[in-house]
């Protein structure tokens, strides 16, 4: 379990990957994960604290989604509506909702390091008006969005710093469980179909490797 925690901490910093140039990687996919894809390799990863820059549709495999409520919860998790009054358990849940919103809308955000009781999210593009402020609601002991300007004046992109190894792993974990050797090309296609984003091979390899760690190291999955 400690190993899993260490891996997750490393992956939480993975939000500044540079897209892989077309043709730059020619490995035989799914046979061997190249050494540079080790989970501990975080040279291109950035923590979203310190005002630095900093989530799926139903699976493409026969994953059990029996109830409409389950589907609704899945949709809310990966495409949260960030509106005034919305509540979260803590600041990290708020930040994760902003990241997931970023993947769903194809915008990237950054956070001010305001501590455990308040946080501000802004669009990473200078001049864009998007801004959300959340802080502690003492009466209920939760974090609540207090103000927001949801207007995006920048353009959407085909890559997104929030569509990380951690995001891919957790969103598609049930699919990785059914298909441990899920091919790189198919993973990239599903992500593109679901959120209209392009991800690089390194992110896919790391996600598949981390999924194996989670699935083999926990009886919950």
Image (cartoon, rainbow, N blue to C red):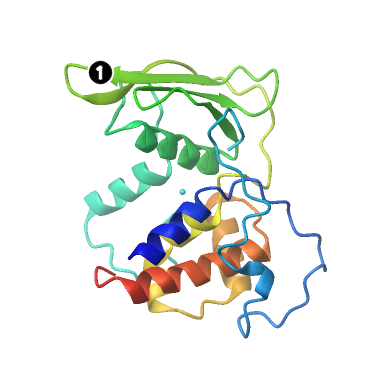
Residue 214 position, x and y percent, is: 38, 68
Quick one: 173 or 75, which is closer to the camera? 173
Where is residue 72? Give x, y as percent: 29, 46
Horizontal and vertical percent position of residue 167? 48, 53
Left/right of residue 64 with respect to residue 46 in the rendered view:
left
Identify which residue is drawn at 36% across, 44% down: 77
Above or below — where is 94 with respect to 30? above
User: Which residue shows up at 46% across the image and 48% down it?
Assistant: 55
Residue 70 as seen in the image, left or right of residue 129: left
Mark 1 residue crowding within 10 angstroms, few (<14) / some (14–19) / many (20+):
some
- Seen from this angle, which residue lies furthest left? 139
Secondary element type, mark 1: strand
Q: Identify the residue at horizontal 51%, vertical 70% (top origin).
A: 208
Q: Which residue sits at x=36%, y=31%?
A: 91
Q: Nearer the viewer, residue 151 or 171?
A: 171
Q: Give the quarter of the image for residue 151.
A: top right
Residue lying furthest bottom: 31
Residue 28 is left or right of residue 211, and the answer is right
Q: Is residue 30 above or below residue 111?
A: below
Which quadrant of the structure image shows residue 155? top right
Q: Is residue 108 left or right of residue 69?
A: right
Residue of label 1: 137
Q: Is residue 146 visible?
A: yes
Q: Nearer the viewer, residue 106 or 48?
A: 48
Q: Position of residue 171 (x, y in %)?
A: 42, 57
Q: Is residue 61 visible?
A: no
What is the quadrant of the N terminus in the image?
bottom left
Looking at the rendered image, the quarter that the C terminus falls into is: bottom left
Relative to 212, say whether 202 is above or below.
Answer: above
């Amino acid at each position: 379990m400690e190993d899993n925690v260490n891996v997750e901490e490393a992956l939480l910093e993975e939000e500044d990957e540079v897209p892989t140039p077309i043709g730059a990687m020619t490995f035989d996919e799914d046979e061997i994960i190249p050494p540079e894809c080790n989970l501990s390799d975080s040279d291109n990863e950035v923590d979203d604290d310190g005002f630095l820059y900093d989530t799926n549709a139903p699976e493409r495999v026969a994953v059990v989604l029996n109830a409409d409520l389950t589907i609704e919860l899945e949709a809310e998790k990966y495409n949260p509506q960030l509106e005034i009054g919305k509540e979260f358990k803590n600041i990290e849940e708020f930040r994760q909702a902003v990241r997931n919103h970023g993947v769903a809308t194809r915008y990237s955000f950054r956070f001010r390091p305001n501590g455990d009781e308040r946080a501000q999210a802004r669009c990473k593009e200078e001049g864009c008006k998007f801004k959300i402020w959340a802080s502690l609601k003492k009466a209920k002991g939760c974090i609540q969005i207090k103000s927001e300007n949801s207007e995006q004046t920048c353009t959407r992109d085909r890559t997104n710093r929030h569509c990380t190894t951690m995001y891919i792993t957790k969103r598609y974990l049930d699919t990785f469980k059914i298909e441990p050797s899920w091919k790189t090309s198919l993973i990239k296609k599903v992500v593109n179909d679901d959120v209209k984003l392009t991800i690089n091979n390194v992110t896919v390899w790391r996600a598949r490797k981390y999924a194996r760690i989670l699935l083999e190291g926990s009886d919950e999955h």
